[in-house]
Amino acid sequence: QVQLVESGGGLVQAGGSLRLSCAASGRTFRSFPMGWFRQVPGKEREFVAAISRSGGSTNYADSVKGRFTIARDNAKNTVSLQMNSLKPEDTAVYYCAAGPLYTDYRGGTPNQYDYWGQGTQVTVSS
């Protein structure tokens, strides 16, 4: 089991940057692939990015490719999302999630992820 806590959200102007971080408790962090999702009220949770257990493989939604970077530090039990060139349409609550244990799943289906953080709000003003 793993508990996830996101941080780093806030208000930023369009074109700016934010770095989200997700801290995980538990000794098995390195055994989970990790992902970031986002959600706006009234819409389904949307895949943003995912990373394999080693950090060697990543996957991104087309809408963020080239602007966002996911990374993980297994020694510190953290996964981050560096967000550059932010747009108003990036406004959402961002969640980190742990995928299926002992796999390198990097897909975008929310119900494939077993553990979720509480979310952090990102607001991009125009």
Image (cartoon, rainbow, N blue to C red):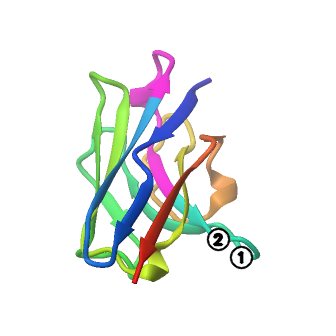
**Marks 1 and 2 close (CB-CB < 8 Å):** yes
Q: Is residue 99 left or right of residue 61?
A: right
Marks counted in the figure total 2
Q: Which residues are magenta?
A: 24-36
Give the vertical position of 72 relative to 3 (above or below). below
Residue 100 screen position, x and y as percent:
57, 42
Give the vertical position of 41 relative to 71 (above or below). below
Residue 68 screen position, x and y as percent:
29, 66
Which residue shows up at 53% across the image and 60% down it? 37
Residue carrying label 2: 40
Residue 10: in magenta span: no
Which residue shows up at 36% across the image and 40% down it? 79
Measured Cα–Cα span from mark 1 to mark 2: 6 Å
The tag on residue 73 is: none
Residue 61 screen position, x and y as percent:
42, 74
Residue 24 screen position, x and y as percent:
47, 28
Q: Nearer the viewer, residue 41 or 27?
A: 41
Disc 2 marks a residue whose amino acid type is Val
Instruction: Specify the quadrant that holds the C terminus.
Output: bottom left
